[in-house]
Amino acid sequence: MANRLHVLLIEDNEDDALLLVRHLKTSGFDPRVRRVESRTELAEALDQSKWDIVISDYSLPGFDGLTALKIVHDSGIDLPFIIVSGTIGEDVAVDAMRAGAHDYVMKDKLARLGPAVTRELREAEERRARRRAEAAYRSLVESSLQGFVIMQDRRVVFANSAMAQMLGCSVKDLLGRDRDGIDELVHPDDRERVWNRYSNRIAGEPAPDRYEFRLLRVDGEPCWVEISANRIEFEGRPATQATFADVTTRVRRDLEQHAIASAATSLRLADDRSEVASVILDRVLNLLDGKGAALTTLDPETNESVYAYARGAWVEIEGERVTVTKGISGRVFSSGEAYISNDVASDPHLAFPIIAASTKAVVGVPLIAESETLGVLLVGRNRPISQDDIVIVKAIAEMTASALRRITLNEELALSNVELTEAYDSTLEGWARALELRDSDTQGHTRRVTDLTVRLGRKLGLEDEVLVDLRRGALLHDIGKVAIPDHVLRKPGALDEDEWVIMRRHAEYAFEMLSPIAYLRRAIDIPYCHHEQWDGNGYPHGLSGEEIPLAARIFAVVDVWDALLMDRPYRAAWTIEKTVRHMRDLSGIKFDPDIVSVFLEMVGEDSASQTP
C-alpha cells in the first residue's frame, strides 16, 4: 500500500508538477498535492494545512526557491525542503543548502526524487523525536527538586528553577554568569577546589564525581550542597552537567554533633563553674548563630535568679539579679520547661531591655540534674528559634547541668572518686547522645540497651565493679561509627559488599579510640566484640564460644532484642512473641545459649509483672 504524502509544491508549470507527482507515485508514495505559485499562496497554505514536505522549483516569475525557503523557515514549521530545478548550478545549490534547504534534485535526474524524499522524511522524524526527547528531558529537569546546571567555557548556559530557588534568585539571574559571577555564589574557602575540579573534568582528567562544598545564597546565607557532576557535549562542545542537592540540614547536624561531643569533652575537663560557663556559652552562641547568651543560677538564700555569666551582646547583664519568678529565666525556672519567644520585644516576661535591643528571639532551657533545677541557659538571636534549635540547646543544657552538678559535688566532697566517676560517665553519655543525634533512627536505643544490659548483668550475678564497666561499654557500643562515612552509615537501603567492609570496621575504630583511655580499657569488650557470634561467624576476629568476652556476649543479646522491637525505616517493629522465637532460634548459633535463657526469663518476668 502506497504511503500517503502531503506535498506542498511550489511550481508554476503544471506539466512539471504532474511529472513530479508521477515520480513520487513511482517511488511508492500516494501524494496529496497542493500547488502554489506565489508568496501569498505559500503563506496561506502553510497556515491552513499540515504538510509532510515542501518541494519547490528554484525559479518562478517574481518568486524563487530561496525566498520560498525563507518563508517556510520564518513560519517556524520544521518541514523537509527540497529544491527541484533544471537551471541552477552547483554553487547556487550549495548556497541553497546553506540557507536551510535539505536537498536539491535536478529535473533531468528526477529518479533521485523518491529516495531524497524518503531520506528527508526519515531525518525530519528523527529531528522531531530528538526535540520531543529534549522537551521531555527539559521538563524532567525543570520539575526536579534538585538544582541542575550546565556550564560551558566557565559560564552558566542552563539552570533550572530548583537551582535558582536554592540560591534565592531567578533563573534569569543565573544564566550567563561568568567566572566572576559564579564566584559570588561560591564560598571563598571552596572556590579554588571547585574550579580545579571543573577544569579537570572539562579536560577529561580524573575528578571526583560527587563531593560537598558551600554555596552562598544571594542574601549571603551559606548553603551546603552535594554536587554530582559529569562531562557532556553541549551543542557540539565540551561542558559540565551537574545536579545539586541541598544538604545544609545534614551538614549542620553533623557540625552540631561534633560540637556537642567536643563540649562534653571540655566539660569533663572543666574545673569550676566559670570554665563550664565559658565552654557552654561560647558553644551555644556558635551553634545557634546567637547574638547573646547567659547562664543563670539560683541563690537559695535570697530566692533570686542570678545572671552569673553572660556573653555577646548580653555581657552587660552579667551579675544582675531578679526575683526567681521574674523574667524569661523565671518563667523557665518555675515551669521546668523550655520556653521560646520569637518576638521578645513584646514578651511580657522580658526583664532586661538590652535583650530586646540586641536580639529578636530568645530560648530558655532549664538546667536540671537529678530532678533539681540548678539554673537556666538562655540564648538569643535575630532569626526565629525552631524546635530543632530546642533539641540542640536541651542537649547542651543536659551536659551543662551534669557538669555543674559534678562541680558542686566535687566542691562538697573534695573531688571524691564518686564525683569524678560521675563526670566521666556524663562525658560518655554526651558521646552517646552525640552519636545518636547523627542517626535519628536509633534515638533512645543507647539508653534502653544500657539499662537492660546492666539488669541482665546483675541477673547473671556480676559484681558492682563489673557492672560499672558493663554500663560504660554499653553506652559506647557504637562509638566506632563516628568514623563511618555518612553515605554508608545513613544509607536507607541495604549495604553492598564494599559498604559492609567499611561498616564492619567500626569495631576496630572503637578499639583504636578507647584503648588509649585508661579508665575505659575494662569497658572495651562490648564496643570491640559485640558483633562476634557464638558459632564463630562474627567480626572483627571470628571468635567463638567462650573466646568471646562475657560482656560482649551479654550485650549482643540485648542489642538484637531492642533493635527488633523498634521501628526502623526499612521494617516495622517485631512483636515480642516473634522476637522471642527469633532469639531462641539463634541461641547456640549467634548467642550464648545460657545468656539467652536467663535473658528471656528476665523479660518474661517483666511481661508478667505488667499484665493486669
Image (spheres, grey):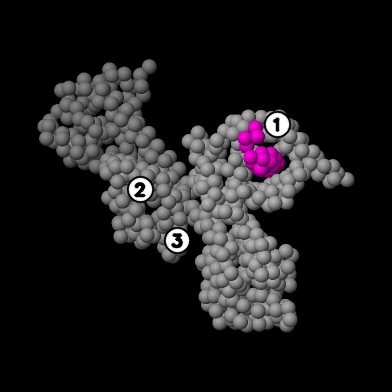
Q: Quadrant of the N terminus?
A: top left
- Between 235 and 92, the residue placed more toward the observer is 235
Name the residue tied to disc 1: 587
Q: Earlier in the sequence, mark 3 or mark 1?
A: 3
Asked whether the beta carbons under mark 2 and mark 1 sit within 8 Å of each other, the answer is no
Vertical position of residue 261 compared to residue 54: above or below: below
- Between 229 and 193, the residue placed more toward the observer is 193
**Stretch of the chain drawn in magenta:** 545-568
Q: CA distance from mark 3 to mark 1?
A: 53 Å
Name the residue tied to disc 2: 150
Give the structural element (helix, strand or loop) at label 1.
loop
Asked whether the beta carbons under mark 2 and mark 3 sit within 8 Å of each other, the answer is no
Q: CA distance from mark 2 to mark 3?
A: 22 Å
Can residue 277 be found in the magenta stretch?
no
Q: CA distance from mark 2 to mark 1?
A: 57 Å
Q: Can you tell which quarter of the image residue 65 is in?
A: top left
